[in-house]
Amino acid sequence: MTRPRRIVVLTGAGISAESGINTFRDNGGLWENQRMEDVATPEAFARDPQLVQRFYNARRAQLKDVMPNPAHLALAEFEKTFDGGFLLVTQNVDDLHDRAGSHTLIHMHGELKKSRCTRTQKIHEQMADITDNTLCDCCGTPTLRPHIVWFGETPLMMDEIYQALDQCDLFLSIGTSGHVYPAAGFVEVARQAGARTVEINKEPSLGIDHFAEAIQGLASVEVPAFLRTL
């Protein structure tokens, strides 16, 4: 098999779950005991900003208790030694890929450890909780929201992602459910570009039929093993 020269990797909640991060959506359709409509839309933030801030404050605090797992570390190490084009796109809003050492990384759904000013749209590092009294660095007023892409908003850096997909010869999807678009459609873009398409998942995703190859198992085991084959 020809060695790939341009790789795009997509990761989802499954890779972070193995580090102990609560998955965003459980089998009952609730997001950590909250309805999606109450915590993950612009309308929810306008209606009850305190509830939304508490939800993301709790998720941000959880990051202190988790560490990157072997899948995160293997991706970062592969990127360091790979001499071709490499892009890691994550749907996750945690910082586990960053802490593992990944550099060519796009957080398409935003980042828990950042906030955004609703007045200027400037992005700030955010480690502490956001409350009614938290002042924005650029405005000096309480205008901060989580730097998270909510339902109804456009994911970040989509032009860069699609350009990489159009040029890749390997697309690897790890720990994704296939529920959420546009990420669920990335495999089709890669297929049209002629790329090899591989899914690594604990359970088959909704889009498994669109992949040429599927590996079932834990990301912490299967991702390092797969990368060694490259």
Image (cartoon, rainbow, N blue to C red):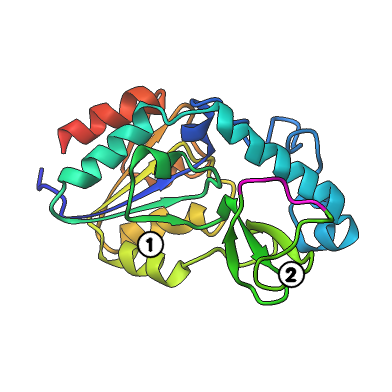
Label 1 sits on a secondary structure element that is: helix
Say above or below: 14 vs 142. Answer: above
78 and 147: which is toward the camera: 147
83 and 216: which is toward the camera: 83
Q: Is residue 159 visible?
A: yes
Please give the label number shown on residue 119: none
Three-letter amino acid code at the position of disc 1: Val
| Mark 1 vs mark 2: in front | 2
Q: Quadrant of residue 194?
A: bottom left
Alpha carbon distance from label 1 to label 2: 43 Å
Please give the label number shown on residue 140: 2
Crowding at dot 2, Cα within 10 Å, few <14 / some 14-19 / many 20+, comes out as few
Please give the label number shown on residue 189: 1
Q: Is residue 183 left or right of residue 213?
A: right
Say above or below: 186 vs 102. Answer: below
Q: Is residue 64 left or right of residue 172?
A: right
Q: Residue 72 appears at what percent x and percent y?
A: 37, 35
Q: Residue at x 15, y 44 (%)?
A: 81
183 and 114: which is toward the camera: 114
What residue span does the magenta drawing correspond to? 127-131
Q: Residue 6 appears at what percent x and percent y?
A: 21, 57
Dominant SS of magenta comes to loop
Is residue 128 one of those drawn in magenta? yes
In the rendered image, the quadrant that contains the N terminus is top left
Q: Residue 116 appears at what percent x and percent y?
A: 65, 64
Q: Residue at x 76, y 56 (%)?
A: 134
